Image (cartoon, grey):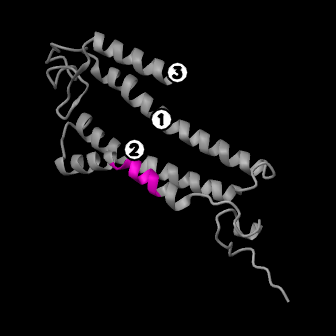
């Protein structure tokens, strides 16, 4: 509910102050003409003069929250599994930590590529079309990347008669070798 409330209210506010304009790449938080608001020489005809602040408040800060929430949730999950192994019999903390790191790695790779692309455009004022193309492809493939991580790391229940040496993954754990004589 909080996500919807913030998204709708910020979109209505930005539309009211005419802050949605073409930014040289797509429609996003920008003033018109493109170079206005950065210095006192060019006055904005549409949108606020302080577009950099608007972009930070309504673009950068929500992106930081999108990065922090998965970190907090994954860390909480790992610590819960580590402290309460009896309640989570199918997984151990190491497996959960590995899966969490893979998912976070996919998210951070995507954010890094997108951040470099947007940073080059908005803060350096340059457009690198090859990198923009790569960034767009990466953005469209994010769901595919997450699906591949899920399929690679999905957890299978103990399928070997509850043998804990399989570590909840269906594969033999190399650390726990037992010899029978």
Residue at 55% x, 53% y is: 101
Residue at left 32%, top 46%? 140
Residue at figure coordinates x 72%, y 49% from the top left = 81
Task: Name the residue tied to disc 1.
Answer: 66
Kindly identify which residue carries mark 3: 2
Q: Earlier in the sequence, mark 3 or mark 2?
A: 3
Taking depth in this image into account, of 51 and 58 the one nearest to the observer is 58
Q: How far is the residue under mark 3 from the one under mark 2?
A: 22 Å
Per the image, the residue denoted by label 2 is 111
Query: Relative to 114, is 180 above or below?
Result: below
State the extent of the magenta-drawn residues as a range.
141-148
Q: Residue furthest right?
A: 181
Tell me the quadrant of the picture where the C terminus can be found.
bottom right
Instruction: Answer left or right for 91 relative to 9.
Output: right
**Taken as a whole, is the magenta stretch helix, strand or loop?**
helix
Alpha carbon separation for disc pair 3 and 1:
13 Å
Q: Residue at x 20, y 36 (%)?
A: 125
Foreground disc of the pair 3, 2:
3
User: Where residue 156 is drawn, which disc sits there?
Assistant: none
Whole-percent x, y for residue 104 in the image: 51, 49
């Amino acid at each position: 509910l909080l996500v919807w409330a913030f998204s709708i209210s910020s979109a209505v506010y930005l539309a009211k102050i005419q802050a949605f304009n073409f930014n040289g790449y797509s429609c996003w938080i920008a003033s018109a003409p493109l170079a206005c608001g950065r210095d006192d020489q060019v006055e904005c005809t549409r949108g606020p003069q302080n577009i950099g602040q608007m972009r930070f408040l309504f673009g950068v800060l929500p992106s930081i929250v999108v990065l922090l929430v998965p970190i907090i949730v994954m860390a909480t999950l790992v610590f819960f599994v580590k402290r309460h192994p009896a309640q989570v019999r199918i997984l151990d903390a190491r497996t959960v930590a590995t899966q969490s790191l893979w998912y976070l790695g996919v998210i951070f790779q995507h954010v890094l590529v997108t951040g470099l692309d947007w940073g080059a455009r908005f803060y350096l004022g340059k457009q690198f079309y090859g990198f923009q193309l790569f960034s767009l492809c990466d953005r469209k493939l994010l769901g595919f990347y997450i699906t591949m991580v899920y399929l690679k790391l999905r957890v299978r229940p103990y399928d070997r008669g509850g043998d804990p040496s399989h570590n909840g993954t269906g594969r033999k754990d190399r650390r726990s070798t037992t010899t029978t004589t």
